Image (spheres, rainbow, N blue to C red):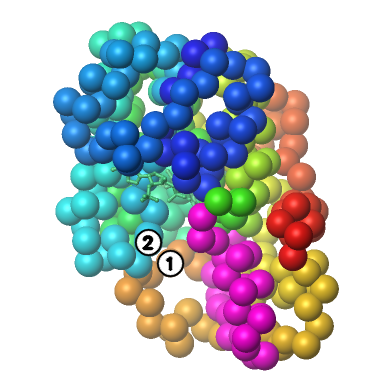
Amino acid sequence: MKILILGHKGMLGSDLFLRLFAFHEVEGKDIEDFDIASQEACTEAISEIEPDVVINAAAYTDVDCCESDSDTCFSVNAEGVKNIALACRERGIKIVHFSTDYVFDGMKRNPYQEDDKCNPINVYGKSKLAGEQYLKQFSDNFLLIRSAWLYGKNGKNFVKTIVEKARTEKVLNIVDDQVGSPTFTWDLAAAVQLLIEGRHTGIYHITNRGNCSWYQFAVKILKSACVTDVTVKPIKSDALQRPAKRPHYSVLTCRKFFETTGKTMRYWQIAVDDYISKMGY
Ligand SMILES: NC(=O)c1ccc[n+]([C@@H]2O[C@H](COP(=O)([O-])OP(=O)(O)OC[C@H]3O[C@@H](n4cnc5c(N)ncnc54)[C@H](OP(=O)(O)O)[C@@H]3O)[C@@H](O)[C@H]2O)c1
């Protein structure tokens, strides 16, 4: 397959590139090449490259900045998706797009299914939901994958932040009232490859298996990195006063992915161990 990855320098995009490169003809574009918020630029690039599949891993992902910069956030996360979908539809190209657990409000107490009602509680989540809606409206051949709490080799992420903070701070205060599923982008990229090669379409939830709070995640990261002289203290989200609200519970069920592919994702703790060892922490 000829595959165009948008946002190929980002955290997920770079792992998708590495995974797919060995099996397909893959081309990557990022913000230096063109801005997905421009309809003209999307159409020009997609018609020039003529891929079979466009994977959109480009997004405005700074959840707190989205609160004060909602115009840019919507132009990338919503209009950008519409631009790509329109350019793909005209040429019969499949589009693979990513969304987030933050499209849900976190009021459920058991894992969210693909058809559960969305009700985002921050600007980022609202922009991602608008992107999903454009995708459904303007594409008849799409794969929409919702994931959560990503970490990977490239880019800023929670695992890197905790390991780096632990080098200078001996007490870390971490929120214990938000529960989700940490997901290694390397694992997510493998799952996406399976769905693409199986020519599946529709909405899928994909995360590593199991769930935890950010506090439990931080404890595991330090244990895995053999850091023994740092104390992690649980705090409530309100204590942080971050610009964007986060859902208290945003665990996604991956049952549909299992039923479709026969594969399960590995447990999040095993993925963290693997990441820490790959990063040499
Ligand atoms: N990170 C998470 O925890 C998480 C959780 C659930 C879902 N997701 C979704 O997963 C996908 C990948 O996330 P990620 O964390 O890998 O993102 P990321 O690391 O921020 O990568 C996004 C890439 O897109 C580029 N980009 C930004 N605006 C662009 C534009 N207007 N035109 C073209 N390229 C642009 C970025 O460039 P710059 O770096 O220069 O801005 C970056 O290279 C996104 O759809 C995100 O919403 C992420």
**Magenta residues, as a range?**
155-181
Is residue 180 in the magenta section?
yes
Q: Secondary structure at mark 2?
A: helix
Which residue is found at the position 38% from the left and 70% from the top?
245
Mark 1 neighbour class, 10 Å CA radius: few under 14, some 14 to 19, many 20 or more: many
Which residue is found at the position 60% from the left and 51% from the top?
152
Residue picked out by circle 2: 63
- Compared with 37, 127 (above or below) is below
Residue 246 circle label: 1
Mark 2 neighbour class, 10 Å CA radius: few under 14, some 14 to 19, many 20 or more: some
Quadrant showing the N terminus: top right
Q: Is residue 269 visible?
A: no
Q: Is mark 2 within 8 Å of ligand 1?
A: no
- Compared with 144, 147 (above or below) is below
Q: Earlier in the sequence, mark 1 or mark 2?
A: 2
Q: Gap in Å between the C-alphas at discs 1 and 2?
A: 9 Å
Q: Position of residue 36 (x, y in %)?
A: 27, 35
Q: Position of residue 277 (x, y in %)?
A: 79, 57
Q: Quadrant of residue 263?
A: top right
Q: Amino acid at mark 2?
A: Val
Residue 161 circle label: none
Q: Is mark 1 within 8 Å of ligand 1?
A: no
Quadrant showing the C terminus: bottom right
- Compared with 46, 18 (above or below) is below
State if disc 2 and disc 1 touch (CB < 8 Å).
yes
Q: Nearer the viewer, residue 107 or 212?
A: 212
